[in-house]
Amino acid sequence: MFKIDLNKSEQYTLSIRLSADGFSFYIHHPSKEDEKCYVPYKVDVSYSMTANIKEMLASTEILKHTFKKVNILIESPRFTFVPFDLYEDDHSDTLFYQNFSKIDNETVLCNILGKSNTVLLFGMDKHAHQLLCESFPNARFFACTSPLIEYFTNKSKEGNTRKLYAAFKKSQLEVYAFDRGKLLMTNVFNCKHTADRVYYLLYVWQQLGYNQAKDQLWLANLPTEKDELLTELRKFLQQVITLQVLNPDLPIDIQTLLICE
């Protein structure tokens, strides 16, 4: 349901989320809570991302308006971190391809994460990037993991414990480890079953030497089998906490991006 007035679109923020299994966009007025709308967009998985973007832009009238701000979030496993003190803008490609093999038609983008004092480099299809820049000249591009890291960095400073955050996707588990505001590691695991999710979380916990009684595991974007997952995890860890989000129907990375702005 649309609750926005497109005659004043230049007052709104548009956030577009791009993933291999579907797109979505969220439009909201920064100072008027009731003026917002969220729209999922089904993609044709046999098409390239660029072709799906082109189709979405051509067929969605609402996206042809002018917006005050445009955020574009890209879900991709091709990302890596560089400490801010060691980052040089001219060497983004060199740093990125130390961790990934080169692929054709890729552009390397960066997000400077001020709260965690790191730089996140990520790859995006060059043609998709160009198409979106032409449609939204003022767009800012983010890896979907970037706003999560900024949000979790802030949350991890609360209290006096180390924290492991887990965000669940359809077939992936993303983990973010912190020691009172300091980012220790992040990783993505391909898994969609409770047993595998429990295994990877406990494996990371053990590798980092977290305390089973004192340190905390925070779970965000819980899967459908959440009760089974919580039961299994609480057999081993005492501090398993569900992270409450403001809007369960809105992707957590869009929510955290807007919170951290």
Image (cartoon, rainbow, N blue to C red):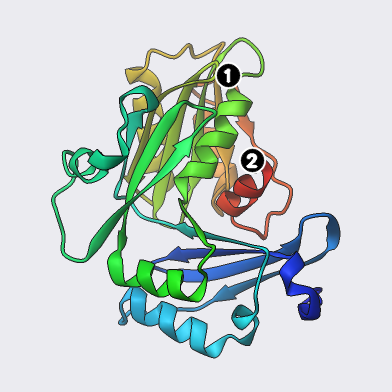
Query: For the C terminus, which image quadrant?
Result: top right
Residue at x 53% of width, y 41% of height: 148
Residue 89: where, in percent of width, then height? 31, 39
Which element carries disc 1, helix, strand or loop? loop
Front-most of residues 206 and 107: 107
Please give the name of the residue rendered at 45% of the width and 32% of the height, measured from the top-left corner: 176
* x then y, percent, for residue 114: 52, 31
- Give the CA distance from mark 1 to mark 2: 29 Å
- Of marks 1 and 2, which one's residue comes earlier in the chain? 1
Q: Which residue is mark 2?
A: 260
- The amino acid sitting under disc 2 is Cys
Task: Confirm whether residue 82 shows in the render.
Answer: yes
Vertical order, 141 against 185 (above or below): below
Image point (63%, 30%), residue name = 241
Front disc: 1 or 2: 2
Dividing the picture into quarters, in which one does residue 251 lie? bottom right
Vertical relation: 241 (above or below) 184: below
| Residue 110 placement: quadrant | top left
Q: Nearer the viewer, residue 96 or 67?
A: 67
Quarter occupied by the N terminus: bottom right
SS at badge 2: helix
Give me the residue at 41% from left, 56% from top.
75
| Residue labelled with disc 1 | 238
Residue 49 x/y as whole percent: 35, 73
Vertical placement of 32 versus 97: above or below? below
